[in-house]
Amino acid sequence: MPDPSTEPRPTRFRTGTLSPRKPTRFSYRPDRDERAAIASDLGLLALHALDLTGEIRPVGRDELLLEAVLTASADQACSVTLVPVPARIAESVRRRYVAGLSDPEGDEAEMPEDDTVEPMPEVIDLAEVAAEALSLALPLYPRAPGAEFAPALHAADGIAPLKDADLKPFAGLQGLAERLQAKDESGSDEER
């Protein structure tokens, strides 16, 4: 008898064939090659583990709700030094698929209050859901411990490079105001 844990599990569900009464449970754990492809797509150095476990259940006649937990272990490049920075992700994932809902068209569109609502697709692809949820959960600018941005000063030979203080034209006025106030206070003491 085959071991159920080693049997392939579906990763794509046709929405028209899902049960209208009971939840469809799933567990998506991509193999090493699939993780490498996802890591490449997301610009990761490595994706050691990825798991999306949850269920898709009907809500009324024209709506499906996907609720899951995403866990992942990945290495990202430090935004300062490019050394590997480990990331551990544990996020709740929620998508509401609504029939008859259309994507906004045109150059400008309002963002809906509930950002989990999407038009009902023909197929729910767990690999796409997991990759999207992972990309949203990863730190935007990972930084290795102790990595600091150092100021870079550049100028042509013989020219002093500009510093941040040089670009603040009103910084000198602060010093002048303080000196005038000190002179005013010392002058008022002499008059008394």
Image (spheres, grey):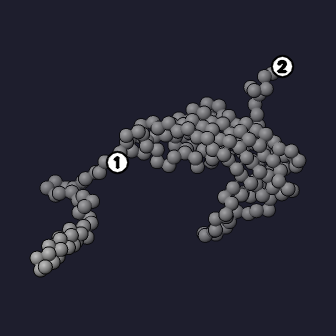
- State whether residue 163 is above or below residue 12: below
Q: Look at the image and tell me in which quarter the C terminus lies.
A: bottom left
- Mark 1 and mark 2 lie on one chain; the one further toward the N terminus is 2
Q: Under tag 1, what secondary structure?
A: loop
Which of the image's four quarters has the N terminus? top right
Please tell me which residue lies in front, 189 or 68.
189
Q: Which numbered dot is residue 167?
A: none
Residue at image position (65%, 41%) is: 70
Q: Residue under label 2, please give it.
A: 1
Q: Quadrant of residue 51?
A: top right
Across and down, in percent, residue 150 comes to 31, 48
**Looking at the image, which residue sits at the far top?**
1
Camera-side residue of 87 and 153: 87
Tell me the crowding category of disc 1: few under 14, some 14 to 19, or many 20 or more residues within 10 angstroms, Cα based: few
Q: Quadrant of residue 7?
A: top right
Crowding at label 2, few (<14), some or many (≥20) Cα neighbours within 10 Å? few
Residue ID for mark 1:
149
Q: Residue at x 52, y 39 (%)?
A: 87
The type of residue carrying mark 2 is Met
The image quarter in which residue 52 lies = top right
129 and 189: which is toward the camera: 189
In the rendered image, the residue lying farthest to the right is 21
Q: Position of residue 54 (x, y in %)?
A: 74, 41
Compared across the picture, whether 146 is left or right of 118 comes to left
Q: Is residue 45 visible?
A: no
For marks 1 and 2, give the one nearer the viewer: 1
Question: Mark 1 belongs to which amino acid?
Answer: Phe
